[in-house]
C-alpha cells in the first residue's frame, strides 16, 4: 500500500510544483458488476473495478502510472443482511519514467516493447480489456509488460534497442495473497535482457538481429536470438515501368538454446498487389518457441464476426507449422471481396498431430445510390474448415449483416451468424450455434443493442460443476446493452442479461472471457 | 459546466474508492466484527481504520492530480509502412495532426477510412497530417499494406505493434480519432464512428483551416459522401 501512495504523491508534487508548460493526461475506467459467474457462484456477487491511468509530461520527460482498484462482496452467511467484503485491493500495477529527445528514448519502470515481429520478444498492452481470473476470481488488466528499463535509438539508417526487465505472468492477477502466513503470489519472478540492432544499407532493405537472455533462476537460463530481413521490391517494379505494382517480403529465423532443449522459429511473409487487388502470404514453423514474453505471428485471421472469433485457433508455439494467404479485391470502391485460407498443424506428441484449417470468403458492400435517402451497407461471409484440437471434424459458418443510416445520422443494424459443426468420429454429434444482434444508434451518441446467442453444443454447459454430465438441451443467452457517449469525455455502457463465455480477441491477442449473468456498468472518462 | 469538469470525474472516482472500499471497510470493522470481547478485535479495528485512511489518501491524491489535467498529447516515435521514423512533435511542427487508431478487423474503422482519405486530400496541402495508427500487431501486420492499397487509402500509416502509443494516448476503443493542434492540445476525441461523428470531425478540421475549409463546393462534395 505504501508504494502506491508514494507514487501518487510524487506525481502530485510534479503536477503542483511546475504546472507551467506541463501536461497531465488521465483516463479512468470503472466497471461495476452485480450478478454471478455460472459454475463459480451459487449466488450474486458484487464487484467494483477501477483503472486509473495518469501521465505527466514536461519537456520530453514523462512520468505516469496505472492504479487498479478491485473490490468484491458476497453474502458468506446465507440469509444474512450483511454483505461481506471478500476482497479489496488498491494496487499500482504500472509506473514509468520516460525521457525522449529526438531519436533517443529511455524508459525506466513498466514498458512495452517488440523485437523483430515478436518472435523473440513482444511485451504489449490490451487497452480496455478487463479480465476475470476464474481461479482467483479477481478482475484486472491483463497487460503483458516488462518492468525494468529500455533504451532506444532510432536513426535514419539504423536503429538499436537494449532492454532489461521482469516479464509479468499475466495469468495471475496482481496482489493475490496465498499461503500461511499470507504473502503475495509472485507475478515477476524471473528476468530477461535483450535487444535489437537493425540497419538499412539501402532505403528498401532492412536487416537486423535480436537476442534475448531469459533467467528463470540463477542456474536456469534460456537464450534466444533471431535474424531478419525486410525487402521492399516496389522500387524495382517502378524502375521497370510497373508503377502500379508493389511487393514487400520479410523473413525472420530464430533459434533457442538452453540446458534442456533446442528450439527454432521461421516466419516468412510477403505482400503484393496491383491496382485494386492486394495479396498477403505468410508461412510459420515454430518448435519449442512458447514463452511468457514473446508472441510470434499466429497466421490465423482475426475476424470481426463473433462466432468466428470465438472458434479461433490459439497459437501453440511449442510445435506449430502452417500458412496463411489472403486476397483483397476492391470493386469500383463500392464493395470489397476478401478471401482467406489458413492452416496450422500441431504435433502434440510423436505420431500424434492435429490440424486446424479455415477458409473464409467475405463481401462488404456500400450500396449506391442511396435507398429512400438512406445509406445502406451489407456484409456477407461464409467460413468453413476443421479444428481437430477441439475435436471439430467439420464446421460451416455463414453470416449476414445489414446497416441502414438515415439522413439524420441514426443507424439501425441487424446481424445474423449461424454455425454448424460436426465433431470428429467417436465424439459427440454435431451442433448449431446461432448469434443475432439488433442494434440502434442515435446521432446524439445514445444507442442500444439486443443480443441473442444460442447453442446446442453438448459440451457447452451452464455450470462447470456439471461437466461430468452431458447437457443435451439447447442453451440461450439473451442480453440488452445500452451505450452513451457525451461531451467527448464520457462513455457509459450498461449490460443486462446473460453473456456467453469463450474466446475473444483484441489487437491480435485472444483470451478467455468467463460467462456472466447479471448487470454490468462500465463508465469511462478522459481528463 | 460542472459535469464537464475534471473535478466531477475525479469526485466520482473518489466516491468509487471511498464509497465502495472505505465505507464497506468501516462497516465490517464496526458491525460485522463488532464484539470487543473477541480476541484480536482491537487489532482488526486499527488495521481497518489504517486501511481506510490509506484509501482516502489515494483518492484525494488522484483527485488533486486530475484537477490540474488538460487534454494534451504526449510525444511518441513510431515506424511507418516504409520503415521511416514518425515523430509526433516533428509532425506538429508542420501543422495540426489527425490521429486515427484502427485495425484491419475493425469494421467501423474501415467505414471511417474514406472520410479520412477525403480530409487528407482536402487539407493535407494546407498543413494537416492525417496519420493512421494501426494496432493489428504482428498477427495482422502483413495484411495492412494490401488492405490499404486495394481501398485506395494513401494517407500515412504508422505501426503501433505493442499498443504502447495507444496506451500513452489513453485510447481504449477502436476506432478512436484525435485532432491535435500544433501546440499539442487534443481539441477533439472521437470514439467509434458514425456519420454524425464524421460531420463533427470535418467541422473541427475546418475550424483549424478557415481559409481552405471555406470553399463551399468542396464542402458539398465531402458532405455528399456522408
Image: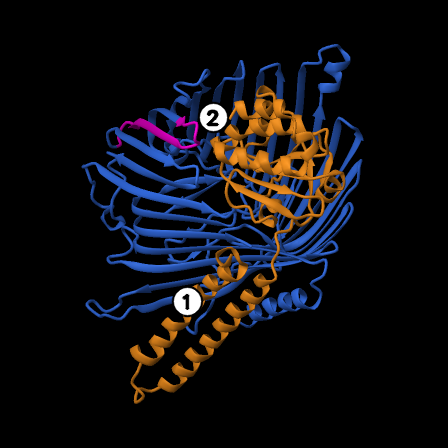
Chain colours: A blue, B orange
Of residues B182 and A35, the one nearer the viewer is B182
Please tell me in which quadrant of the rendered image residue A74 appears. bottom left
Rendered position, B10 above or below A332:
below
Which numbered marker is on residue A343?
2
For the C terminus of chain A, the quadrant is bottom right
Check the residue under mark 1 and report the chain it is in. Answer: A
Total marks shown come to 2
Q: CA distance from mark 1 to mark 2?
A: 45 Å
Q: Residue at x 43, y 80 (%)?
A: B49
Q: Do labels 1 and 2 touch, CB within 8 Å?
A: no
Please rate how many residues cluster around mark 2, counting C-alpha atoms within 10 Å: few if below 14, some from 14 to 19, many from 20: many
Nearer-N-terminus badge (1/2) = 1
User: Magenta-highlighted stretch: main secondary structure?
Assistant: strand
Q: Is residue B66 left or right of residue A391?
A: right
Determine the secondary structure under disc 2: strand
Seen in the image, is B157 located left or right of residue B32? right
Q: Residue farthest to the top?
A: A241
Residue B153 magenta-highlighted: no
Residue that appears at 67% across and 54% down: A164
Tag nearer the camera, 1 or 2: 1
SS state under label 1: strand
Which chain does the residue under circle 2 lie in?
A
Q: Residue drawn 55% across and 65% down? A: B62
> Could you tell me if residue A263 is visible in this image?
yes
Write down the residue under mark 1.
A88
Please report the bounds of the magenta region as a residue range: A404-427
B164 is higher (above) or lower (below) than A407: below
* Residue A214 in the figure: left or right of residue B31: right
**A193 sits left or right of A484 in the view:** right
Say whether residue A406 is magenta.
yes
Q: x, y percentage for residue A355?
A: 42, 28
Amino acid at each position: 500500500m505504501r508504494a502506491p501512495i508514494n507514487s501518487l504523491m510524487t506525481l502530485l508534487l510534479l503536477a503542483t510544483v511546475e504546472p507551467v508548460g506541463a501536461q497531465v493526461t488521465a483516463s479512468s475506467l470503472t466497471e461495476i458488476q452485480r450478478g454471478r459467474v455460472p459454475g463459480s457462484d451459487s449466488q450474486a456477487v458484487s464487484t467494483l473495478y477501477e483503472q486509473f491511468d495518469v501521465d505527466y509530461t514536461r519537456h520530453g520527460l514523462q512520468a505516469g502510472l496505472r492504479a487498479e482498484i478491485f473490490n468484491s462482496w458476497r453474502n458468506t452467511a446465507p440469509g444474512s443482511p450483511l454483505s461481506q467484503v471478500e476482497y479489496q485491493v488498491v494496487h499500482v500495477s504500472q509506473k514509468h519514467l520516460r525521457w525522449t529527445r529526438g531519436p533517443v528514448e529511455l524508459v525506466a519502470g513498466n514498458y512495452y516493447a517488440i523485437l523483430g515481429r515478436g518472435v523473440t520478444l513482444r511485451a504489449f498492452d490490451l487497452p480496455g480489456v478487463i479480465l476475470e481470473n476464474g481461479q482467483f476470481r479477481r478482475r484486472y488488466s491483463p497487460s503483458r509488460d516488462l518492468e525494468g528499463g529500455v533504451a532506444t535509438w532510432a536513426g535514419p539508417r539504423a536503429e538499436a534497442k537494449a532492454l532489461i526487465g521482469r516479464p509479468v505472468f499475466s495469468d495471475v492477477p496482481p496482489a493475490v495473497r496465498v499461503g500461511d502466513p499470507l504473502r503475495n503470489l509472485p507475478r515477476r519472478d524471473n528476468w530477461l535482457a535483450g535487444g535489437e540492432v537493425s540497419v538499412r544499407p539501402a532505403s528498401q532493405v532492412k536487416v537486423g538481429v535480436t537476442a534475448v537472455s531469459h533467467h528463470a533462476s540463477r542456474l536456469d537460463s534460456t537464450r534466444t536470438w533471431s535474424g531478419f530481413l525486410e525487402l521492399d521490391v516496389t522500387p524495382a517494379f517502378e524502375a521497370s515501368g510497373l508503377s502500379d505494382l508493389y511487393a514487400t517480403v520479410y523473413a525472420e529465423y530464430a533459434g533457442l538454446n538452453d540446458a534442456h532443449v533446442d528450439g527454432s522459429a521461421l516466419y516468412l511473409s510477403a505482400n503484393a498487389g496491383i491496382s485494386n487487388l492486394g495479396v498477403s502470404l505468410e508461412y510459420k514453423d515454430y518448435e519449442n518457441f512458447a514463452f511468457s514474453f514473446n508472441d510470434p505471428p499466429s497466421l490465423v485471421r482475426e475476424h470481426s464476426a463473433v462466432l468466428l472469433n470465438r472458434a479461433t485457433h490459439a497459437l501453440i508455439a511449442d510445435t506449430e507449422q502452417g500458412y496463411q494467404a489472403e486476397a483483397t479485391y476492391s470493386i469500383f470502391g463500392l464493395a470489397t471481396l476478401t478471401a482467406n485460407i489458413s492452416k496450422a498443424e500441431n504435433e502434440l506428441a510423436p505420431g500424434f498431430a492435429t490440424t486446424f484449417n479455415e477458409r473464409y470468403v467475405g463481401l462488404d458492400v456500400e450500396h449506391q445510390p442511396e435507398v429512400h435517402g438512406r445509406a445502406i451497407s451489407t456484409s456477407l461471409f461464409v467460413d468453413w474448415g476443421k479444428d481437430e484440437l477441439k475435436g471439430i471434424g467439420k464446421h460451416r459458418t455463414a453470416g449476414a449483416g445489414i446497416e441502414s443510416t438515415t439522413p439524420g445520422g441514426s443507424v439501425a443494424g441487424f446481424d445474423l451468424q449461424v454455425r454448424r459443426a460436426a465433431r470428429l468420429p467417436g465424439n459427440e454429434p454435431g451442433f448449431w450455434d446461432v448469434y443475432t444482434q439488433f442494434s440502434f444508434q442515435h446521432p446524439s451518441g445514445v444507442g442500444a443493442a439486443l443480443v441473442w446467442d444460442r447453442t446446442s453444443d453438448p459440451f457447452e454447459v451452464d455450470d462447470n460443476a456439471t461437466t461430468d454430465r452431458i447437457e443435451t438441451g439447447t442453451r440461450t443467452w439473451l442480453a440488452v446493452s445500452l451505450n452513451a457517449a457525451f461531451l467527448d469525455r464520457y462513455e457509459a455502457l450498461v449490460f443486462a442479461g446473460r453473456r456467453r463465455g469463450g474466446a475473444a480477441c483484441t489487437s491480435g491477442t485472444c483470451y478467455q472471457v468467463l460467462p456472466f449473468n447479471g448487470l454490468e456498468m462500465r463508465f469511462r472518462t478522459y481528463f | 459546466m460542472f459535469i464537464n469538469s475534471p473535478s466531477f470525474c475525479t469526485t466520482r472516482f473518489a466516491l468509487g474508492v471511498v464509497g465502495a472500499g472505505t465505507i464497506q471497510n468501516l462497516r465490517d470493522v464496526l458491525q460485522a466484527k463488532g464484539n470487543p470481547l473477541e480476541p484480536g478485535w482491537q487489532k482488526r479495528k486499527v488495521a481497518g481504520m489504517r486501511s481506510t485512511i490509506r484509501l482516502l489518501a489515494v483518492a484525494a491524491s488522484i483527485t488533486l492530480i486530475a484537477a490540474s489535467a488538460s487534454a494534451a498529447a504526449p510525444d511518441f516515435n513510431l515506424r511507418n509502412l516504409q520503415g521511416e521514423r514518425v515523430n509526433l512533435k516533428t509532425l506538429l511542427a508542420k501543422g495540426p495532426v489527425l490521429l486515427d487508431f484502427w485495425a484491419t478487423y475493425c469494421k467501423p474503422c474501415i467505414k471511417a477510412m474514406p472520410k479520412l482519405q477525403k480530409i487528407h486530400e482536402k487539407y493535407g496541402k494546407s498543413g494537416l497530417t492525417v496519420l493512421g495508427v494501426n494496432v493489428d500487431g504482428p498477427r495482422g501486420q502483413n495484411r495492412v499494406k494490401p488492405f490499404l492499397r486495394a481501398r485506395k487509402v494513401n494517407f500515412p500509416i504508422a505501426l503501433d505493434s505493442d499498443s504502447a502509443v495507444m496506451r500513452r494516448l489513453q485510447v481504449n476503443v477502436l476506432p478512436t480519432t484525435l485532432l491535435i493542434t500544433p501546440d499539442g492540445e487534443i481539441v477533439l476525441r472521437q470514439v467509434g464512428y458514425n456519420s454524425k461523428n464524421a460531420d463533427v470531425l470535418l467541422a473541427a478540421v475546418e475550424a483549424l483551416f478557415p481559409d481552405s475549409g471555406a470553399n463551399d463546393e468542396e464542402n458539398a462534395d465531402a458532405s455528399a459522401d456522408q
